Image: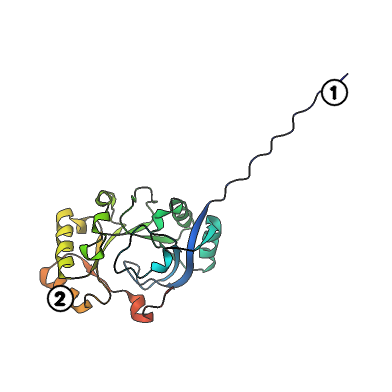
Amino acid sequence: MNAVATPAAETAPEPVSERLRITEIFLSLQGEARDAGWPTVFVRLTGCPLRCLYCDTAYAFHGGEWMDIDDIVATVAGHGVRHVCVTGGEPLAQKRCVQLLKKLCDLGLVVSLETSGAIDIGDVDTRVSRVVDIKTPGSGEVERNRMENIALLTPHDQVKFVICSREDFDWSRDVVSKHALNERCDVLFSPSHGQVAPRQLADWIVAEHVPVRFQMQLHKQLWGEEPGR
């Protein structure tokens, strides 16, 4: 009698690694927004579809190294601090960024996301404080603003305008008023480094009673233009 052949057991395919391209992960002080001054782990993702004229992280446009998301989370946790900021480049340009944000939140960390405002923020975990730029005319990228994001903002989020000139200030003031942004979340006005003097911007805000929070980049006051700080 011929033996009946037994079909070979199927081998399950190996799971596809969930990875992100990372420029750097480092510990410093948060220099901007609501959590300024807190020791914070920064996770800087590689790549950005925008080219803002004042960009100070152009080194993150290219290169970087692929890392498993679980390894990124472990590296963050290893620093032993409570705050983490996912930034770029434009972190949401990598679709798996939302998975990283969720896993960081699941650790019980205080998580913020710095995003250009050009990409839909709707899939970002609601536990994340989304710091959303609205690009001014002086940025050179005003047409990239995704204004639909405004309807998604909550009091947990923040909106940031980088002011390059008096014209930028007037434009930004009008956007805040038109969309009642200050009733949705914190609104931040920052002077573009080397273009608008901080005191000048402060005087404009005070003189016009604009309901926004003035901010300067703490890290530049402490460490200048040194990257990775």
Q: Which amino acid lies under the numbered mark 1 shown in the image of this protein?
A: Ala
Given residues 5 and 98, the one toward you in this image is 5
In the image: residue 108, left or right of residue 211: right
Residue at the disc numbered 2? 203
Tag of residue 218? none
Residue 6 in the image, given as x and y percentages of width and height: 78, 28
Residue 176 in the image, given as x and y percentages of width and height: 18, 59
- Do the numbered discs 2 and 1 sit on residues whose CB atoms are within 8 Å? no
- Which residue lies at the image location 60% right of the left edge and 45% below the top edge? 15
Q: Nearer the viewer, mark 2 or mark 1?
A: 1
In the image: residue 157, left or right of residue 78: left
- Which residue lies at the image location 52% right of the left edge and 56% below the top edge? 69
- Which residue lies at the image location 55% right of the left edge and 56% below the top edge? 70
Residue 222 quadrant: bottom left
Give the SS element for disc 1. Answer: loop
Given residues 196 and 109, the one toward you in this image is 196
Tag of residue 3? 1
Give the SS element for disc 2. Answer: helix
In the image: residue 47, left or right of residue 192: right
Name the residue furthest top.
1
Q: CA distance from mark 2 to mark 1?
A: 92 Å
Q: Which amino acid lies under the numbered mark 2 shown in the image of this protein?
A: Asp
Name the residue furthest right.
1
How many residues crowd mark 2 within 10 Å: few (<14), some (14–19), many (20+)?
A: few
Count of marks placed on residues? 2
Q: Quadrant of the N terminus?
A: top right
Q: Is residue 94 above or below residue 206?
A: above
Q: Along the polypeptide, which appears first: circle 2 or circle 1?
A: 1
How many residues crowd mark 1 within 10 Å: few (<14), some (14–19), many (20+)?
A: few
- Which residue lies at the image location 57% right of the left edge and 50% below the top edge? 17
Residue 147 in the image, given as x and y percentages of width and height: 24, 51
Residue 153 in the image, given as x and y percentages of width and height: 28, 53
